[in-house]
Image (tube, coloured by chain):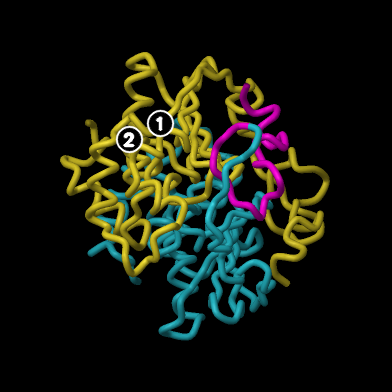
Chain colours: A yellow, B cyan
Amino acid sequence: MNYGRFASYEDFLKELEQFHGKMAPGGVLGLQMVNLAWELLPPGIEMDVICETRKCLTDAIQLLTPCTVGNHWLKVVDTGRFAAVFYDKRTGKGVRISLSTEKLKNFPVIHDWFFKLTPKKDQSLEAILGEICRAGYDILDHRPVQVDPQVFKPRDKTPPVVCPICGEAYPPAHGDRCRGCQGVTDGTFR
Amino acid sequence: MNYGRFASYEDFLKELEQFHGKMAPGGVLGLQMVNLAWELLPPGIEMDVICETRKCLTDAIQLLTPCTVGNHWLKVVDTGRFAAVFYDKRTGKGVRISLSTEKLKNFPVIHDWFFKLTPKKDQSLEAILGEICRAGYDILDHRPVQVDPQVFKPRDKTPPVVCPICGEAYPPAHGDRCRGCQGVTDGTFR
């Protein structure tokens, strides 16, 4: 097991709790998924990630890999599934790793936590984390994927321009006015 | 100046470089924005954030505040503008803080870095960071905002269900099949 930039499992757990705001079993599932990705992908590649959920998995990936939302190496395409695609950012060849609902049946503590069958007050965090560590890759599915070149094409480095409506800077590729003035934040805030 | 969970400016810079993958002046602009938010909002509130860009600002917010993409307290609504909304998660009352292209004219080093007028090889990171620290709030605009209740309503805690097509777990609010099987990842990977 590899912990990225953390020296140990305990160090990773501590930072996960600090960063994510609470201890999250899904972050430890994420640790297993990231490790499986490192095993399945060729060594030495530069890896980008597409995460299919906006949950603890996202934060585990941000902590364990160089990929964050803010550096664009991690993208979130929210299907609501506990899964992520790890791929070579030069070729788009990669692997999709997902939590297997079928295999979960062999791990009742994780199963009942994940499907919220155990009331929160009766859950033992220690028992859930322990079973996730014991389960390792045995609760995961994986398949090869090809990421679309549009996703990993080099980022547009064109300098920002000033929006004629709001006066703020924005990427000119967005059009003749910024997306804010195109209405993208309508229904979000005013 | 407050550095969130970091003991000093240097500690924040070090973690920003580690987490973001490189030193990012935008992350230090983010430090100013977050500090202004803390000054403008009432003390003691629980703050959520909407970030309008997927750039270094996102990562600065994730490091300095309890809000991350994976814990849902940080949302990205990508207008491409260097701005974020910081708000009370109980009421939606908050403040939008943005980089002022007008005020930037008084800070030529930041201006020329931001608008990519200085070739990379001629840029001095030290000079840019130094001017950002000296500028402080003098390059920022802010206005009060009301966030839509849809954005900060309590999260749906309904247990996941198994998708009849792919067999993976997903939130039932997404429909009779998961968003992946509804085609959300089409054009992203196959």
As measured in the structure, the alpha-carbon distance from the residue carrying label 2 to the one carrying label 1 is: 9 Å
Expressed as whole percent of the image width and height from the top left, the position of residue A184 reads 75, 55
Check disc 1 and give the amino acid type: Leu
Check disc 2 and give the amino acid type: Gln
Above or below, B59 against A48 in this view is below
Expressed as whole percent of the image width and height from the top left, the position of residue A55 reads 48, 51
Marks 2 and 1: same chain? yes
The magenta span reads B166-190
- Residue A76 in the figure: left or right of residue A115: right
The kind of secondary structure element at disc 1 is: strand
Mark sitting on residue A140: 1
Other-residue count near label 1 (Cα within 10 Å), few / some / many at <14 / 14–19 / ≥20: many
Residue found at x 39% / y 65%? A119
Q: Main secondary structure of the magenta part?
A: loop
Expressed as whole percent of the image width and height from the top left, the position of residue B106 reads 57, 61
Kindly check if marks 2 and 1 are in contact, taking CB atoms under 8 A apart as contact. Answer: yes
Above or below, A148 against A106 in this view is above
Residue closest to the eye, A90 or A98 = A98
The kind of secondary structure element at disc 2 is: helix
Is residue B35 inside the magenta stretch?
Answer: no
Mark sitting on residue A32: 2
Mark sitting on residue A49: none
Above or below, A120 against B46 in this view is above
Residue found at x 60% / y 60%? B83
- Residue B68 in the figure: left or right of residue B164: left
Expressed as whole percent of the image width and height from the top left, the position of residue A133 reads 25, 40
Residue found at x 32% / y 39%? A31
Residue closest to the eye, B153 or B126 = B153
State the quadrant of the C terminus of chain A.
Answer: bottom right
Other-residue count near label 2 (Cα within 10 Å), few / some / many at <14 / 14–19 / ≥20: many
Is residue B168 inside the magenta stretch?
Answer: yes
Residue B85, by quadrant, is bottom right
